Image (spheres, rainbow, N blue to C red):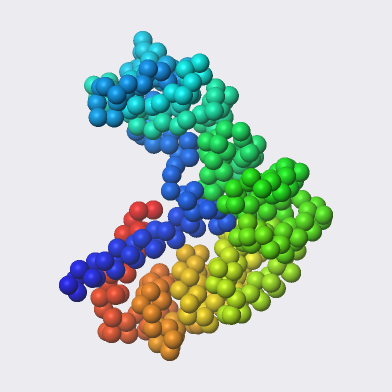
Amino acid sequence: MRKFAGWVQVGITLLLIAWFAARTAACSLCDPSGFSSPTLRQEAALSIAKLIVHGTIANPRTTGGPTGETDLHIKTILRDHPALKGKNTLVLPRFLPISDKEKPPHYLFFADVDDKGKIDPYRGILLRGPESVDYVKKSLALNTKDNAANLLFFFTYLNSPDPEIARDAFFEFAKANDADIARAAPKFDPVKLRCWLDDPNTPPMKLGVYALLLGACGRSEDIAYLRSLFDSKEPRYQNAIDGLLAGYMQQKPREGWQYIQKVLADEKLPLTLRLSVLRTIRFYQGAQPKESKDQVLQAMRTLLRQPDMADLAIEDLRGWKLWDLTPEILPLYQRKGYEAAILRRSIIRYALASPTTKETTAFLAARRKDSPEDVQEIAESLKYLEGMK
């Protein structure tokens, strides 16, 4: 039973570290659900996507298999394959309903092709119409090495009338790193951003990102506007505090960092607010690591004094490879109030990843005596994840 429990803990550790790695590689202010599914560009980059076509569906039927069949009349070939030669129709292995035969739905399909030339459509996306295909064509042709410039393209589609295109464009922001977003943000249109922030139909998960972008490209009146939203009691804006604060700090950094320190120092404030502020810190560490280092370390030092937040601070510092607070982190392992397993394991993980010093050597030697299984499991998980990079 003990061995089984140990493997469960290893699994949890791997999941936590993988989650942190995914988060730090993407926008710190974006909804994490944007990381779970690939964008159209990411799907196209997969080796399995050997064929990409757009077309309209027809003749859905319940015959042909357990899930039925539907014909796809090909209108556009975005990625060709010899298996498609002479074909203008694909049979989809699924029943897809049609509500109006005069206006058949448009779909984009990604397909694999086996060694015998059999086409296997594995992902279909419902499009609003043929105009949406233009977005797909252009996005697949973008230079993958110029992420900041690509965001300018995706910005123009954030409010697309096609919900799938708007979703994909936003997920490109969600998967972009903070530095690329910061480089692109000053070139966006503040008028559009204010309209989207005002619009009650804007999905709440987008508000924080729009606020950040407005802070970077707007004028003084836009910063005052962001402050008014920040002070608003509307739940949709209160849930976007991280982005509103990040946007406000684009032109009011001193006031923003003062607010961050005030919030983090008050343990009576709701945990949700402190977590929102932490996401703002993560954005600035990712976007401006050199310029923000002193303020980030000050904020993390404050969090280390709070057992309910210390493990998050330690994991962030380890992921950022900021070792300045090592003398303050290692003693927490034996401090009263810091006995939680997740917190102690985060300290061991931090020490294992840290540069070798007298402090870390002595700390790990002590842990190998009193918690040898923990040290071994954490070391193996770190080694495994390092090999995945």
- Drawn side of residue 27 relative to residue 60, left or right: right
- Drawn side of residue 316 relative to residue 29, left or right: left
Residue drawn 38% across and 27% down? 96
Residue drawn 72% across and 54% down? 215
In the displayed orientation, state which residue is furthest to the bottom.
336
Residue drawn 57% across and 63% down? 279
Q: Is residue 321 above or below residue 268?
A: above
Q: Could you tell me residue 35's position as x and y percent?
A: 46, 49
Q: On the image, which quarter does residue 368 sit in?
A: bottom left
In the displayed orientation, state which residue is furthest to the right.
221
Q: Is residue 206 above or below residue 76?
A: below
Using the image as rendered, state which of residue 62 and residue 39 is in the foreground. 62
Residue drawn 42% across and 59% down? 19
- Drawn side of residue 278 relative to residue 23, left or right: right
Q: Is residue 313 above or below residue 91?
A: below
- Drawn side of residue 326 relative to residue 361, left or right: right
In the displayed orientation, state which residue is furthest to the left.
1
Residue 143 in sight in this render: no
Q: Could you tell me residue 128's position as x and y percent?
A: 54, 28
